[in-house]
Image (tube, helix red, strand yellow):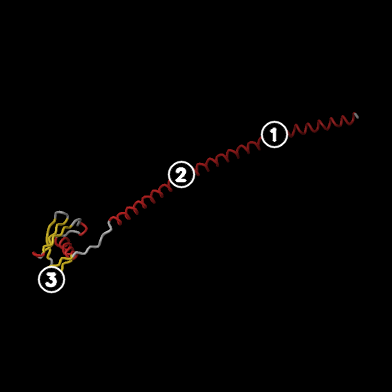
Amino acid sequence: MKKVIQDAEKATVKIAAEVKEEAPKMVKKAAKAAEKTKEAAEKTKEVAEKTVKSASKTAKTTVKEAAKKAEAASSEAKKAVTATASKISKKEIKETVYLQYYGKEIDKDDVMKKVKEVWTKEMKKKVGDMRTVALYLKPEDDQAYFVINGEVTGSVSLD
């Protein structure tokens, strides 16, 4: 029995020596693994922070672009509404005015055409500069008198 105990003690001492010898190696391996885990965690944290910053920038950019597009769409919608309202409010009635006297018939549009010719050819002005035109038709003088923009006066023949 003594021999079994001695053999057991020797085996225990041998195992203890092996464990004592391997323990520092295992501790070093565990420390290296812990260090690598720590480095991986730090890199993961950096990547996550960069991803959050990038996502935040992207979101801000996207929100700004969406706001600009919404503002542009709103502006276009306002223009369309204004143009439509203008067309509705400016809905013109087609008028035809004839002056009949002594067997003659004078069309208002023909008189206006003559007034525009005087304005552009004789006075060297643009039709677009005409804002208002007042016509005074006097069959007894065979003349149409006009006042353009409240200032410029003249006359054209009714013939």
Q: What label sits on residue 49 in the rendered view?
A: none
Q: Earlier in the sequence, mark 2 or mark 1?
A: 1
* Distance (Cα) linking label 3 and label 2: 79 Å
Q: Earlier in the sequence, mark 1 or mark 3?
A: 1
* Residue type, mark 3 in image: Gly
The residue that mark 2 highlights is: 60
Q: Which residue occupies 11% across, 62% down?
A: 138
- Whether residue 15 is situated above or below residue 133 in the rendered picture: above
**Disc 1 vs disc 3: Cβ atoms closer than 8 Å?**
no
The residue that mark 3 highlights is: 103
* Residue type, mark 2 in image: Lys
* Distance (Cα) linking label 2 and label 1: 48 Å
**Mark 3 packing: few (<14 Cα in 10 Å), some, or many (20+)?**
few
**Quadrant where the N terminus lies?**
top right
**Mark 1 packing: few (<14 Cα in 10 Å), some, or many (20+)?**
few
* Residue type, mark 1 in image: Val
Residue 15 drawn at (x, y percent): 79, 33
In terms of secondary structure, where does tag 3 sit? loop
Q: Is residue 46 left or right of residue 89?
A: right
Residue extending farthest to the right is: 1
In terms of secondary structure, where does tag 1 sit? helix
